[in-house]
Image (cartoon, helix red, strand yellow):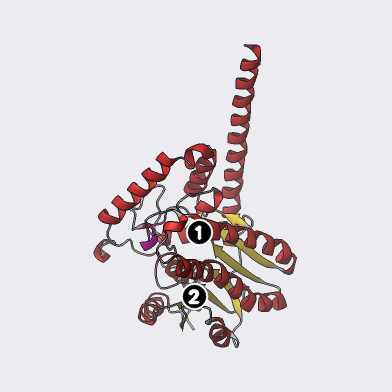
């Protein structure tokens, strides 16, 4: 009986210690985000490049950087969508937006991108482009067109990020300044069955960013993995925004406040709390057949119910006053 009480008491102490540690971590992240106003984006000379910029988080990053007074280069695969975003950026912020069309699921796009950027000094790179090959979660072998899906996901979620760093990082090192923001995902913080390929690719983003920051921090380069949970985009079936589900604009403007907080961040206090809670769930629950079935059913229902937001009800984007060329 005494031994049992000792074990229970130890578990309670351990749980409270973890809670305290997590609270301190979240508090420190919040304090670090207060320093964002001191970050000199203008000192990071040159244009800012955003991949996957035709919608969602990528588009929000392009606007956020332009609203802070920067010209941007937006890269994605659909020219019509990019042209529309470029016009919106110009009309709204007065900044220039250069369009580069590239399908990152392909192998042969990087020579073209390098040619488009070779005469430019790039101060900030946002590696946002990414795909999820199975909208409805499924077991690995049940993924439709599995071989094609493997190639597309690795090209888009892994290879594109590495190659863009290879293209742009040397210039930052030569100038001794720059920032690279690599968009990961909250699912990288825990093993997520049924999203095996996607989750694993985001773990790569996290570890690659962490190691790259260690290598180039002394060169004056900021490299950070940003790992959001639910943001209301097409990939999340336009979930209704709320306390835990942020709009792309809300998430991006919040996440930029964490750019000085370290080599990885969830990008917001609410998502930090979600990450902490997810890591407290025992693996036997996450890996259970019941949990997997519930996840599949939830996503199927979400796909049938959720529609893109009505443009008339869209949240207005905050505009930062900036100098025009």
Q: Which labelled disc corresponds to residue 104?
A: 2
- Which residue is at the front of the view, 153 or 127? 153
Question: Which percent across, then down, holds residue 164?
Answer: 58, 75
| Residue drawn 52% across the image and 46% down it | 275
Residues drawn in magenta: 231-235
Farthest-out residue, front: 141
Residue under pointer 1: 197
Q: Position of residue 151 (x, y in %)?
A: 50, 70
Residue 7 on the magenta segment: no
Question: Please, what secondary structure does the residue beneath circle 2 have?
Answer: loop
The residue that appears at 59% across and 78% down in the rendered structure is: 122
In screen coordinates, is 229 left or right of 164? left
Q: Is residue 153 visible?
A: yes
Q: Nearer the viewer, mark 1 or mark 2?
A: 1
Task: Let me know if residue 61 appears in the view.
Answer: no
- The residue shown at (68%, 77%) is 170
Residue 62 in picture, x, y percent from top left? 46, 71
Q: Is residue 37 above or below residue 290?
A: below
Q: Quadrant of residue 19?
A: top right
Who is closer to the viewer here, 151 or 62?
Answer: 151
Residue 224 is left or right of residue 131, and the answer is right
In the displayed structure, would residue 168 be above or below residue 14? below
In this view, the residue farthest toward the right is: 218
Q: Which secondary structure lies at badge 1?
A: helix
Question: Within 10 Å of the Cα at label 1, are there few (<14), some (14-19), or many (20+) other Cα atoms?
Answer: many
Horizontal and vertical percent for residue 128?
50, 67
Residue 149 versus residue 4 in the image, above or below: below
**Which labelled disc corresponds to residue 215?**
none
What secondary structure predominates along the stretch shown in magenta?
Answer: loop
Q: Could you tell me how far apart the alpha carbons at marks 1 and 2 are, in whole angstroms?
A: 17 Å
């Amino acid at each position: 009986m005494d031994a049992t009480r000792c074990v229970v008491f130890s578990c309670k102490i351990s749980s409270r210690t973890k809670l305290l540690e997590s609270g301190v971590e979240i508090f420190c992240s919040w304090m670090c985000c207060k320093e964002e106003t001191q970050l000199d984006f203008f000192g990071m000379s040159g244009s800012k490049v955003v991949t996957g910029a035709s919608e969602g988080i990528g588009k929000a990053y392009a606007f956020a950087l332009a609203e802070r007074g920067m010209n941007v280069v937006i890269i994605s695969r659909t020219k019509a969508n990019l042209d529309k975003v470029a016009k919106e950026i110009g009309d709204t912020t007065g900044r220039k937006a250069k369009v580069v069309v590239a399908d990152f699921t392909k192998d042969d796009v990087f020579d073209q991108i390098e040619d488009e950027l070779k005469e430019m000094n790039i101060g900030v790179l946002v590696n946002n482009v990414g795909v999820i090959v199975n909208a409805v979660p499924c077991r690995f072998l049940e993924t439709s067109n599995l071989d094609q899906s493997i190639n597309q996901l690795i090209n888009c979620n892994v290879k594109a990020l590495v190659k863009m760093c290879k293209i742009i990082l040397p210039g930052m090192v030569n100038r001794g300044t720059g920032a690279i923001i690599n968009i990961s995902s909250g699912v990288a913080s825990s093993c997520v069955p049924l999203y095996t390929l996607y989750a694993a690719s985001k773990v790569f983003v996290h570890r690659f960013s962490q190691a790259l920051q260690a290598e180039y921090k002394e060169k004056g380069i900021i490299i950070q993995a940003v790992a959001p949970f639910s943001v209301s985009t097409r990939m999340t079936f336009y979930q209704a925004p709320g306390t835990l589900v942020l709009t792309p604009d809300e998430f991006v403007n919040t996440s930029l406040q964490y750019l000085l907080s370290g080599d990885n961040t969830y990008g917001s206090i609410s998502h930090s709390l979600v990450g902490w809670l997810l890591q407290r769930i025992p693996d036997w629950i996450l890996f259970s057949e019941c949990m997997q079935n519930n996840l599949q059913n939830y996503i199927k229902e979400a796909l049938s119910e959720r529609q893109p937001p009505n443009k008339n009800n869209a949240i207005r984007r905050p505009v930062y006053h900036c100098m025009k060329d």
